[in-house]
Amino acid sequence: MSETIEVIKELSPIITKIANQLGVASEHIWGVLVRQAYVEGITDLMLCLVIIVLTVCYWKFIRYAHKKICYQSEKDSWDSDILAPIYVTGAILGFIGAILFVIGMSSAVGKFLNPEYYALQILTNLIK
């Protein structure tokens, strides 16, 4: 906790310098950066929603392809040579989607619960 206070004390002159160059109050810049953290959190949540929608759509496609192929070949089997690439692709995309979902959700939750941290992160990245 004391490290955060020290970082804020070190960044205060830098924020004031940036605010003076821009012609706005440093409190205004801080408020903008905190609001930006919320906006990025919402963006991360939207990414997670897109991942869920794409996963559901692909699953419906797999079910449709399975029914269509099994109906044409008159056998009810999941081990068809035609369906194998669809299953493999689905597994790979599902794995990648799950990883992206976890990353996006953790990022979104962090930005909603502690937006000041992300505002500090933006400022420290500006300094570097």
Image (cartoon, rainbow, N blue to C red):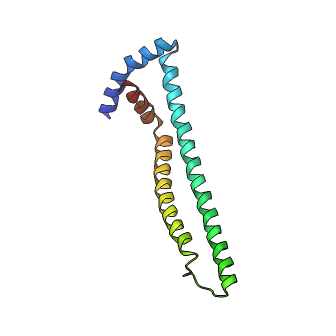
Point 39% across, 30% down: residue? 125
Query: Above or below — where is 51 with respect to 13?
Result: below
Query: Above or below — where is 30 with respect to 42?
Result: above
Residue 91: x percent and y percent? 50, 67
**As rendered, which of 65 and 121 lies closer to the eye?**
65
Residue 19: x percent and y percent? 47, 16
Which quadrant holds residue 18?
top left
Q: Image quadrant for the C terminus?
A: top left
* In the displayed structure image, the side of residue 124 where residue 47 appears, left or right: right
Point 52% across, 12% down: residue? 23
Which quadrant holds residue 38?
top right
**As rendered, which of 123 and 86 lies closer to the eye?**
86
The total of numbered circles placed on residues is 0
Which quadrant holds residue 11?
top left
Residue 63: x percent and y percent? 64, 73
Q: Image quadrant for the N terminus?
A: top left
Query: Above or below — where is 94 with respect to 74?
Result: above
Query: Above or below — where is 113 with respect to 55?
Result: above
Point 57% across, 55% down: residue? 51
Point 42% across, 19% down: residue? 15
Residue 90: x percent and y percent? 54, 66
